[in-house]
Amino acid sequence: MKLFGWFRKPDLFGAPRSPQWRTVRDAHVEEHPQCFACGSFHDIEVHHIVPFHVDPSLELEPDNLLSMCHNCHFRVGHLGNWRKVNERVTYQCLSERHGRLS
């Protein structure tokens, strides 16, 4: 946990989390309990398509959120580096999912 502890801090990259974040996150996972990339129902996290530290006004916007398992969140959402942003995350998730479905 210590290795990844820095990204779980409430003040990430200088952008403080909204007090409503946990409620919105929990509601999103309840409504979308499956990983958008691989289809898993395990270890679901919420990924911001546009990172909230880039545009804080989108932090709670449902259209800016994707449910992803922890593995896909790291691998697809952040390209294997928690500090990276995948600008094509939605497309790449659909490609991953299509590849598994076909």
Image: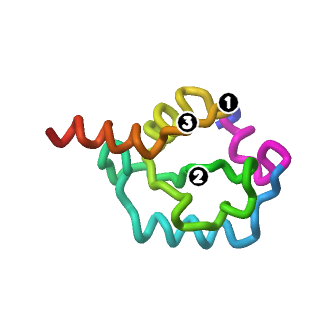
Frontmost residue, 21 versus 95: 95
Give the spatial CA distance, label 3 vs label 1.
Answer: 22 Å
Which quadrant: the N terminus? top right
Query: In the rendered structure, which disc, 2 or 1, sits on the residue that comes first in sequence?
Result: 1
Which quadrant: the C terminus? top left
Give the spatial CA distance, label 2 vs label 3.
Answer: 10 Å
Query: In the rendered structure, which disc, 3 or 1, sits on the residue that comes first in sequence?
Result: 1
Which residue is depicted at the point 74% across and 48% down?
54
x and y percent of residue 36 in the render? 37, 50
Quarter of image, res 97: top left
Q: In the image as oriented, which residue stretches furthest toward the right? A: 14
Count neighbours of disc 2 (C-alpha within 10 A) and say few if under 14, some if 14 to 19, many if 20 or more: many
What amino acid is at disc 3? Asn
Residue 3's tag is 1
Query: In the rendered structure, which disc, 2 or 3, sits on the residue that comes first in sequence?
Result: 2
| Label 3 sits on residue | 86
Q: What's the magenta region?
A: 3-14
Residue 65's tag is none
x and y percent of residue 7 in the render? 70, 41
Which residue is depicted at the point 51% across and 72% down?
27
x and y percent of residue 29 in the render? 46, 64
Count neighbours of disc 3 (C-alpha within 10 A) and say few if under 14, some if 14 to 19, many if 20 or more: some
Frontmost residue, 80 versus 51: 51
- Helix, strand or loop at disc 2? strand
Which residue is depicted at the point 58% across and 52% down?
48
x and y percent of residue 50 in the render? 62, 50
What amino acid is at disc 2? His
Frontmost residue, 54 versus 41: 54
Quarter of image, res 59: bottom right
The nearer-to-camera label among 2 and 1 is 2
Give the spatial CA distance, label 2 vs label 1.
Answer: 21 Å
